[in-house]
Amino acid sequence: MVIDSLLVLGGLALLVLGGELLLRGAVGLARLLGLSPLLIGLTVVAFATSMPELVVTVAAGLEGRPIIGVGNVIGSNIANILLIVGAAAMIQVMHPPRGLAKRDGAVMTAATLAMIVLAFAGTLFWPHGLVFLLLLGAYLVGSYVVERRSGTTEPAGEAAEALEAAPQTWLPAVGLVLGGSVGLVIGSELLIEGAVSIAKSVGVSDAVIGLTLVAFGTSLPELATAVVAALRRHADVAIGNIIGSNIFNVLGILGVLALVTPFEFTSELLVFDIWVMLAATALLMAILASGRAIGRGTALAFLAIYGIFIFVQFDTGFATAVQSAVGL
């Protein structure tokens, strides 16, 4: 168990480090290639910040454990809303930008609903993945067009910080991309190996490991970004980053996973976890639509709900009840 825990910690550290290096290098290359700051923020940064989730999910799929990846997507989306928004709002009251619910929030909700429909439809194959990726591409292009028409030329929040920290010349940019990629690959292997061993030793499923340990680990970059933004009194921008991350998780990561290997949602995910994700999405959308600020009271509620969610994942009585409900 000690060795497995060290593998998990080492894997998480490499994922965080590799993701940060890749982000800086990719942004540097994009700028050297002449891409606009806005396009870099909408595409390169969005892709790079989700690389830990993507690499872990693909690696799990290639190793014949795609359910870890599916659980990772669901767990990450839940953590993004309940844990990260809650943590950021505890530091500083958040005032979500007006209009966020109409475009990006609506896309996040639609992607979540599409995921649930397909989850009950059966096995997902490469055509489903291709459609998801095409929809993601359409969203990114649409976002770019809208921002250009509104007169926005500079990215905000995480994208702006990534541009400031990006290298200015080719050699460091390429080196960061290569180094970050290696860190992500090795980190994902260590994380999966350690997580699977821990799952076997404590008697929990791959889905639970994906929903909790792996999802929390791959969400650490978003959590760190949100906390730093809140400390700098820019907590509002974290909402946009979280919504974008959730959209990318569903359309991008599940899309790639379906291209790599067919997969389906397990009964335990369909009975409980996927509905928690939908409820968290609906809760955030209701707050955004109301135009109300997210204060510490709401933040405490978010964190408490996330804590309960994690607790029931490892509660044997709850697991037995779920198995009885699905006839296992």
Image (cartoon, helix red, strand yellow):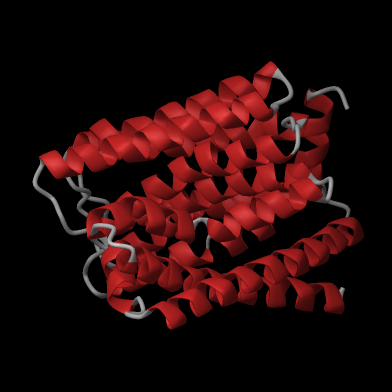
In the image, residue 319 above or below residue 228 = above
Residue 235's spot in the image, x, y percent? 27, 62
- Tell me which corner region of the image, top left, top right, bottom left or bottom right, holds residue 299: bottom left
Residue visible at 44% across and 30% down in the picture: 135
* Whether residue 293 is visible: yes
Residue 316's spot in the image, x, y percent? 81, 47
- Quadrant including the N terminus: bottom right
In the image, residue 325 above or below residue 177 = above
Q: State the residue in front, 80 or 20.
A: 20
Q: State the residue in front, 249 or 171.
A: 171
Q: State the residue in front, 296 or 244.
A: 244
Q: Residue furthest top?
A: 121
Q: Residue furthest left?
A: 151
- Quadrant including the C terminus: top right
**Number of numbered discs:** 0
Residue 298's spot in the image, x, y percent? 34, 51
Residue visible at 63% across and 75% down in the picture: 14
* Whether residue 285 is visible: no
Q: Is residue 34 left or right of residue 146?
A: right
- Tell me which corner region of the image, top left, top right, bottom left or bottom right, holds residue 141: top left
Residue 83's spot in the image, x, y percent? 47, 56
